[in-house]
Image: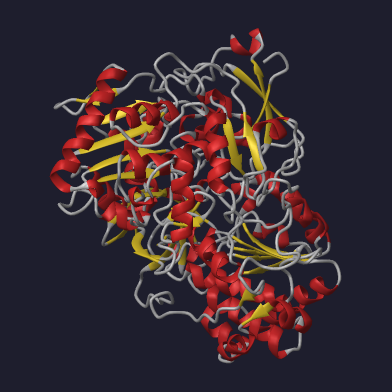
Amino acid sequence: MPNGAETHCPYCALQCAMTLSPATPEVAGQAPAAAAPAQPAAPLEVSGRDFPTNRGGLCRKGWTSASLLRHNGRVTEPLLKGSDGVHQPISWDQALTLITAAVKDTQRQYGNDAVGVFGGGGLTNEKAYMLGKFARLALRTSRIDYNGRFCMSSAAAAGNRAFGVDRGLPFPVTDLDSASVILMLGSNVAETMPPFVQHLQGARDAGGLIVVDPRRSATAAFTSDGGGLHLQPTPGTDLALLLGISHVVVHEGLVDSAFVAARTSGYPALVRSLSAFWPERVQSITGVPANLIRDTARRLAQGARAGGSYILSGRGVEQHVDGTDTATAAINLSLLLGLPGSARSGYGTLTGQGNGQGGREHGQKADQLPGYRKITDPAARAHIASVWGIDESLIPGPGLPAVELLKSLGKRDGVRCLFVHGANVVVSAPDTNAVTAALRELDFLVVCDFFLSETAMEADLVLPVTQWAEEEGTLTNLEGRVIRRRRALTPPPGVRSELWLMARLAELLEAPSTFSDDPETVFEELRLASAGGLADYSGIDYAMLDRGEAAYWPYPVGSSGTPRLFSDGFAHSDRRAVMVPVTPSKRAVRSFADDSLALATGRLLEHYQSGSQTRRVADLLTAQPQVRLLIHPSTAASRGIADGDYATVSNERGEVLCRAELSNSVRPDTVFLPFHFPGQENANRLTEAATDPISGMPEFKTSRVWVRRAVSNPVPAALVDAGLPLHAEEAS
């Protein structure tokens, strides 16, 4: 690595480019920050690298990412939990023997589907592909799903039924630079992926940035001073709001009639479904003034005719029991305006996890085979069987989506032995008290991780695996662009790649087919498996990626890839997009008449997902050391809560203890908690495991809660775990 390894950030799907170089002696020898005496200096220096998504910039998480590579909390040998609940080191041979015996014993007693796998959207394409193959052939189970079910499933389901394909952004992110109007639905990119904000600047300069969010987030704040509009609907009413905007488009003659006639189906039924959602009625449902609903529709239509309009959706409108229908309403609006497939306009959804796009394409979803093929499709099964060199009958059928999979844990007819790869469900799943209890009912839990995460602490066996800078592979960013992850550092002794682990276990379990531990060899097989599928990678190889060539799927052999989808048609057999009428359900629209409030959850600038990594970075944890409840001053006053007081947030599922932060950024009927913190600070103790009937997406955004002033001042668990010094009031 004489000139450094050119790679990409390990966090979000923007996949900002960076270079990793050996730390200079001065940097490597620096004393660690006083706030974290146990944390050694990073072995690598991070520098930003020019790339279309980030143009050399990184966020705080990216700049500090290398500090975890030699963290003192790193797991570097297999750990077996003893009868006293303490994990003790064992050898890899012992670990593999234990796993093999557990799988065989479990399946002998309860059947093949008593073994399950829970994957992650941060795994490389190679590992995600191999995990699906490993589950179905080595473990012989249908019970596999992943944490992307909590992230992208509703957007994916909506995209598939409207367009026939799911690619988060069906255009390069740089296309947004020239837009005059951008409608942002439930996405706070200023904190979740800060380098993305530069792509909104053109719309902001034109006064055309429109942000829909019940909270006045950092992204919504960009609409001030003439930058655009902030629509602040009642939580859970985004679908009605989108129907109201679409009603205006239809009834004011703003529809792109030529586009609709030539490239869509379902228009008459859609128009009928919109008749009951005139702006004044929608105002009564959402709280958004009718004049702003009309203004939004007109701006989008004007932008589509002139400078370019884009509609972008995020988790805020999708993580609901009607998330698929809400994303569908956004797509319908974009089709009415003629945006998808246009040279200067479009619709897209912002993928969250680092490989959230590639992770959902190649086989770790319950109903899916590589290449984004349906596991129930006979032709798809035959193709994959031929690539794997097996009889098609050996491939199990569809399994259970994530929430249902977790609910089945420990039950006699459910999963009794579970493998977890790249996920921390004790913090990130809905209704985590129930999930934790279910994990404890398992006969055997294996967790692959590089730290003792909250889920790893529950495991019978923890296996140490490589971190991002210690491995080779590929990922697929939010644009559908396949990129290279390059190894910059030798992993610690005792740490193994998950590809190595799956190859060894496949051999011990006498699996059919072959299982390589070489990433490039696995990618070559992935190419063959994906060929002819919706997510076709067959024309991509490591050599072209190493040359820096842009590779957007679908990329069949002999093509030059597809930076922009839909220019000549959609992925349905008739090449038309489908407009699907949708309407709010009674379950989705909830009003809380007593003193309860709506809880919204989300992310902070300094932390990522369950916080298992970022809570171990001193700079990030010092900036955001504990969970804080954003609550409106009038709401707090009615409960006797002052700024900085501790408060309890509770419902029938659990209780969270947190500091209150008074803020006018939230509505009086709503409170906000970030979901990065464990234990008594875990927001997902309160979220509901109810799911969207189409996508399996949990309801994360509108849980009913009660807020009260707390009587005690706890010590934040994250501070204790990190060994950070406490404020006097917290130590007392």
Q: How many marks?
A: 0
The answer to whether 337 is drawn above or below residue 397 in the figure is below
The answer to whether 148 is drawn above or below residue 471 in the figure is below
Q: Is residue 143 left or right of residue 698?
A: left
State the image coordinates of residue 6 (x, y, percent, origin top left): 69, 27
Q: Quadrant of the N terminus?
A: top right
The answer to whether 240 is drawn above or below residue 107 in the figure is below
Q: Can residue 493 be seen from the camera position used here?
A: yes
State the image coordinates of residue 138 (x, y, percent, origin top left): 33, 38
Instruction: Tell me what residue is drawn at x 67 percent, y 78 percent.
Output: 264
State the image coordinates of residue 371 (x, y, percent, origin top left): 54, 51
Instruction: Tell me what residue is drawn at x 57 percent, y 65 percent.
Output: 159
Q: Is residue 715 left or right of residue 64?
A: left
Instruction: Tell me what residue is drawn at x 71 percent, y 64 percent.
Output: 566
Q: Nearer the viewer, residue 351 or 496?
A: 496
* Image coloring type: secondary structure
Q: Residue 207, located in which quarter of the rendered image?
A: bottom right
